[in-house]
Image (cartoon, helix red, strand yellow):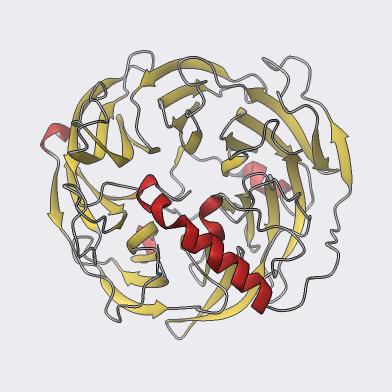
Amino acid sequence: MISAKLRGVLLCTVLFLASACAAGPAATEEPTSATTPQETSAPAGTPAASPSGDVMTSDNVKHIANMPLTAPFNGEGDLGTDLAFQGDYAYVGNFGGFSIYDISDPTKPQLVSQVSCPAQQNDVTIYKDLLILSIDEPRGGPECDSAEGERKWEGLRIFNVKDKKSPEYVGAVQTDCGSHTHTMVPAGETLYVYVSSPGPEPDSETCPAPHELISIVEIPTKSPASAKVVAKPDIFPERQHSELASGCHDITAYPEKKLAAAACFGDGVLLDISDPVKPKVLQQLTDLENFQIWHSATFNNDGTKVVFSDELGGGGQATCDRNTPATKGANAIYDVVGGKLERRGYFKIPREQQPEENCVAHNGSLIPVDGKDIMVQSWYQGGVSIWDFTDSSNPKEIGYFERGPHEGGGIAGSWSAYYYNGYIYSSDMTEGLDVLEITDPLTDPAKQVKMDDFNVQTQKSY
């Protein structure tokens, strides 16, 4: 979702959206899907029924459990954000801090602890005993109890979570324009972290102009309190940016392939990360006709494709309607041909959403099926979609989960949806943690894949 820094220019977003829809192709045909809708309720034994009532799924997807937001993360501004996994634990970010769940029995997740540490984004990753949070909001200082009024610090916060019941704050690193998202690139006892952030912000102490860079933070795993910024590479050789901002929104690294794909404001960038401190630009992409905010990137397992998503409207608009072309607010599938990316097709959920439902492509991950390219992905109030892009030119949805419009309106829906050890976990901004199971011939082989940990922006082969 777009950060507070960019809210001042959301009027431009709305105007862009209106003009794009008016000038784009004719309204799409009535959405169709090979999946069959099925009304279901939260299964027996879950902590509580969804406040939004019944959910709707395809006939191959089952809603296994829901863990509602609880105090101190159930206030109006406490939105659920990103997810990370390690062993039998799920780590869930929230604008209020982060939570740790025991998912040894995915049908009955158990809350282990919650750490109150308010800040926007709080996207989370986990590496060994270290948990890292992205802070994209100027605060009074790096500590969790710092006030937001002084607006003089933003960046990364680092915790030791060896004791899951009592995580410990160990340090922080300030970065230019904060950290909207971050990406881990492990290198032995050193953890490099690529920090993505939008900017610049006029008259800001934390986000001065210009902002043509990403930040690379070095975290010694044995002394994380000594973490520091070691590089600020400029990865925009052609200077083609969105009218919204410069900088990047999200970077996905594939260390085994020595590649990274950066989704930036106005550009997609393919990087060589053989030297993680000195990433080299291999290719810079633009799609001025269909993409507004290059939001995130996902490699397929063998590194021969990249899916880039577009967060048209910044996550706050209803773009999954019949008046918005299917190529806008969607995913673009690129094949790697001769070391270069070539666009093959687009994918957008085929289920039309209501005018009050914010909906656009958001966070997702591969479902590990050998020989197939299958992804699960969040779409805010469009829910969770499972889709197959094995044929890059003909992607199709094979399953889904979604709720009806959020009661009371406003921003809601699935922020992140990832597959981990046989189940799909969705961090819903207002409804908490959902657990889903898909039973389908295409995805069933994934149940044989056992992951020790999972951070979506640091891909590993399976």
Q: Residue at x 20, y 31 (%)?
A: 142
Q: Residue furthest bottom?
A: 338
Report if residue 58 is visible in the image.
yes
Q: Is residue 120 rendered to the left or right of residue 20?
A: left
Residue 220 appears in view: no
- Residue 207: x %, y % from top left: 21, 52
* Count of numbered marks: 0
Residue 460's place in the image compared with 65, above or below, is below
Residue 51: where, in percent of width, then height?
70, 23
As rendered, which of 328 and 67 lies closer to the eye? Answer: 328
Q: Is residue 306 above or below residue 119?
A: below
Q: At which x and y percent is residue 289? A: 56, 79
**Where residue 167 appears, x then y in whole percent?**
31, 19
Which residue sits at x=31%, y=36%?
132
Q: Is residue 109 above or below residue 40?
A: above
Quarter-wise, where is residue 118 in the image? Answer: top left
Is residue 338 left or right of 107 when viewed as pictured? Answer: left
Q: Please tell me which residue is depicted at 47% across the width and 29% down the height of the picture.
A: 77
Closer to us: 223 or 238: 238
Image: 183 above or below 67: below
Judge left or right: residue 268 versus residue 302.
Answer: left
The answer to whether 446 appears left or right of 307 in the picture is right
